[in-house]
């Protein structure tokens, strides 16, 4: 590292420190002076190393799926209820967060492959920002699930992802945890083929990671045998009546003590479906199992991840 780069690093640190109050600065000083930051630094480096394989997988998927990561064989419709009910085909663009991080999105915008805005009435200045929607979790969110929210030892556990699509949760579970069995349930055959291709190309253990081409409502056996169920927002893929059916199905078949991980709070999801009162005693929110690892993450980027257990 040159003298100039050291000076620039010190400048960036001072900018960060200048935003802290006295108490916060004292905490940071203690963290550094006690040398405990070194252990955190090693864990951070380990995370970055393990993330590289997911970046490689993402780059492979980019070559075989459309830019918007939506299959022609899929039926994707803007929801009529929930916090995404204001989305429509005009104002919404799908940009998959597993495939494209913020820097990559910015590069796509600069190259003209993505747009930030749309015209309200075909005049050049009356424009509105597009809403970017991702149907996958980002790499950082996947790391947060397995390195902060869930227990560290999942060797004897089965993880199920509802609507696994391109398989991001499956690959995250495979590389960020020691989960014994990882199952993706996906209705779309084209996405199942993509996932199976990635599993084979990256020589993942097929006894440990599996893709099931099915409606989750037809696989009560997988649901009942799962210790952890990860549920991404389903609004764009099934209507509210089908979602109600799914939650009734889950209440019937999910075992007591099963962890639920979602990227929207259960209370919000069930409120939108008018099921909050019906299911309020069925689940409870949990504290993260590996809270000591939160220091490794930008918590704001993971603030919309929630952990529950079934009562």
Image (cartoon, grey):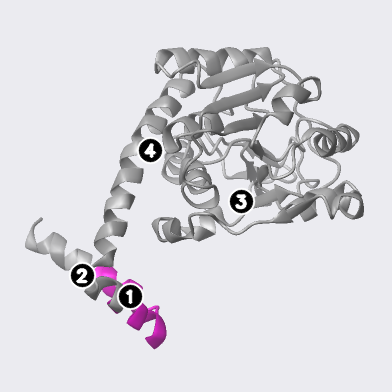
Between discs 4 and 3, the one toward the N terminus: 4
Residue shown at 79% from the left, 47% from the top: 86
The answer to the question of whether label 4 and label 3 lie on touching residues, with beta carbons closer than 8 A, is no
| Residue segment shown in magenta | 11-29
Distance from label 2 to label 4 (Cα)? Answer: 27 Å
Distance from label 2 to label 3 (Cα)? Answer: 33 Å
Q: Is residue 121 visible?
A: yes
Q: Which residue is mark 1?
A: 28
Which of pointers 2 and 1 indicates the residue nearer the eye? 1
Compared with 209, 286 (above or below) is: below
Q: Position of residue 189 (x, y in %)?
A: 67, 12
In the image: residue 23, left or right of residue 306: left
In the image: residue 221, left or right of residue 142: right
Q: Which residue is mark 2?
A: 10
Residue 39 forms part of the magenta stretch: no
In the image: residue 51, left or right of residue 34: right
Q: Which residue is mark 3?
A: 305
Magenta region, main secondary structure: helix
């Amino acid at each position: 590292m040159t003298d100039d780069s050291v000076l620039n690093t010190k400048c960036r640190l001072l900018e960060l420190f200048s935003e802290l109050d006295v108490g916060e600065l004292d905490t940071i000083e203690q963290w550094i002076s006690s040398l405990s930051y070194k252990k955190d630094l090693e864990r951070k480096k380990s995370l970055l190393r393990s993330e590289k394989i997911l970046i490689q997988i993402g780059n492979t998927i980019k070559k075989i799926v459309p830019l918007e990561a939506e299959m022609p064989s899929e039926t994707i419709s803007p929801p009529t209820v929930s916090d995404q009910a204001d989305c429509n085909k005009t104002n919404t663009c799908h940009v998959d967060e597993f495939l494209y991080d913020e820097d990559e999105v910015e590069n796509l915008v600069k190259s003209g492959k993505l747009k930030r805005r749309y015209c309200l009435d075909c005049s050049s200045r009356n424009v509105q920002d597009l809403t970017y929607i991702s149907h996958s979790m980002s790499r950082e969110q996947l790391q947060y699930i397995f390195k902060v929210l869930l227990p560290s030892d999942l060797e004897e556990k089965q993880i199920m992802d509802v609507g696994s699509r391109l398989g991001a949760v499956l690959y995250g579970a495979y590389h960020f945890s020691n989960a014994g069995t990882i199952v993706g349930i996906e209705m779309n055959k084209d996405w199942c083929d993509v996932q199976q291709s990635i599993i084979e190309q990256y020589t993942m253990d097929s006894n440990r990671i599996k893709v099931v081409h099915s409606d989750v409502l037809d696989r009560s056996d997988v649901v009942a045998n799962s210790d952890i169920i990860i549920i991404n927002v389903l609004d764009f893929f099934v209507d509210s009546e089908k979602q109600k059916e799914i939650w009734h199905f889950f209440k019937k078949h999910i075992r007591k003590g099963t962890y639920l991980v979602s990227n929207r709070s259960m209370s919000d999801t069930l409120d939108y479906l008018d099921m909050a009162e019906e299911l309020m005693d069925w689940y409870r929110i949990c504290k993260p199992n590996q809270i000591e690892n939160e220091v490794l993450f930008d918590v704001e980027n993971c603030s919309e991840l929630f952990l529950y257990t079934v009562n």
